[in-house]
Amino acid sequence: MVDDVGFVPGDGPTSGISVTLTAGTLQAIRERVGRRGVSAYLEKAAQRQIERVNLDELIADFDKALGPADPEAVAAKRACLTGGDSGAGAAA
């Protein structure tokens, strides 16, 4: 059985399941990827959600060990990554 083996998200054989979605959500997915792309879309969405949860847990562990990040340092790093203004010198 596939569930007995430890695979990381995105790895291993495929396995069919039944998923219930609201009509609006399913319609929005089908409009983006067509009827035959729904499974691949949901696979990628699930992988991104797992990554987000794992990152949230990592951040929580970091905050617990070292305290919350300095907002000005975060803004400066964000500016470096996005090429934008950090907003650190902006008037309140």
Image (spheres, rainbow, N blue to C red):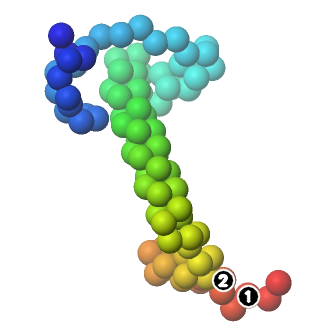
Crowd tier of the residue under label 1, counting other residues whose Cα lies within 10 Å: few below 14, some 14–19, many 20 or above: few
Q: Which mark is residue 90?
A: 1
Q: Nearer the viewer, residue 31 or 70?
A: 70
- 68 vs 33, left or right, is right
Residue type of the residue flagged with mark 2: Gly
Residue 42 shows in the view: yes
Toward the right, the furthest residue is 92
- 26 vs 81, left or right, is right
- Disc 2 target residue: 87
Q: Nearer the viewer, residue 53 or 11?
A: 53
Crowd tier of the residue under label 2, counting other residues whose Cα lies within 10 Å: few below 14, some 14–19, many 20 or above: few
In this rendering, is residue 11 above or below 18? below
Name which quarter of the figure residue 6 lies in.
top left
Q: Nearer the viewer, residue 56 or 60?
A: 60
Q: Quadrant of the N terminus?
A: top left
- 82 vs 90, left or right, is left
Q: Residue at x 40, y 21 (%)?
A: 38
Q: Residue at x 49, y 79 (%)?
A: 77
Q: Which mark is residue 48?
A: none
Residue type of the residue flagged with mark 1: Ala
State the image coordinates of residue 21 (x, y, percent, origin top left): 55, 15
Distance between mark 2 and mark 1 Cα atoms? 5 Å
Q: Residue at x 69, y 91 (%)?
A: 89
State the image coordinates of residue 72 (x, y, percent, origin top left): 61, 82
In this rendering, is residue 26 above or below 45? above
Toward the front, the furthest residue is 65
Q: Nearer the viewer, residue 67 or 23?
A: 67
CB within 8 Å, label 2 to label 1 = yes
Q: Quadrant of the C terminus?
A: bottom right
